[in-house]
Image (cartoon, rainbow, N blue to C red):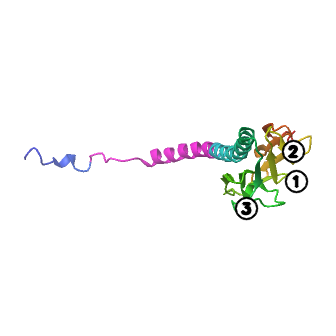
Amino acid sequence: MSASTPKPRDIGFARSAGFTMIELMMTIAIATVVMTLAIPSFRYITNANRIASEVNGLVGDMQFARAEAIKEGQGVTVCVSTNGTSCAAGDTFWQHGWIVISSVGAVGLLRVQPPFSSTDTFESPALSTVTFNREGYAGGLPAAGTLITLHDSTSTSAWTRCLSLTFSGQMTTEKVNGTTCT
């Protein structure tokens, strides 16, 4: 017999490559446990990032408008806008989008925020426009200030955020404390 020809007793005794059924089932069980732990955590991260992005978008544009008003010595307005070119009178749902406009005719539109792609709601009881004057004060607000509240699509209080805006132009974001923001 040649060296490359197998001996009769070696045929059928070679170990096949691959996984046993027990190894495969253990791998599936471990993967299931890991996914069960990871998916809720991933959902938390994506919700937290979306909510933070939405509220910080309005805060950033409000701060920009205030800084521009002080810098230019002219009023700058942030208002709800459904079309991206003009203010939507009486619309208090900021998730429809907003614009930042200067009262200086030549400058006009400074920034545009399109509507939210999510089903989150961002509303104020009666505030659809904020105009910052040349001193940085926010016009159109009650003396005590106002809250613009962001709710996620499930209205879960853990995801609710509020933008607090005072007459002096100070802005802060807050998590809900119990049932409302303070």
Judged left or right of residue 22, residue 53 is right
Q: Residues within 10 Å of mark 1 (few under 14, many from 20)?
A: some
Of mark 2 and mark 3, the one earlier in the sequence is 3
145 is within the stretch colored magenta: no
Q: Which residues are magenta?
A: 13-39
Pinpoint residue 82: horizontal percent, then vertical percent. 73, 61
Q: CA distance from mark 1 to mark 2?
A: 9 Å
* Rendered image: mark on residue 96: none
Furthest residue in direction left, as rendered = 1
In front of the other: 127 or 11 = 127
Numbered disc 3: secondary structure: loop
Question: Which one is earlier in the sequence, the residue at label 1 or at label 2?
Answer: 1
Residue bearing mark 1? 126
**Mark 2: which amino acid?**
Thr
Residues under numbered marks 1 and 2 in contact, where contact means CB atoms less than 8 Å apart: yes
Helix, strand or loop for disc 1: loop
Quadrant for the C terminus, please: top right
Magenta highlight: main SS: helix
Asked if residue 77 lies left or right of residue 11, the reply is right
Q: Amino acid at mark 3?
A: Thr
Find disc 3 in the rendering and name its residue: 82
| Lower sequence index among marks 3 and 1 | 3
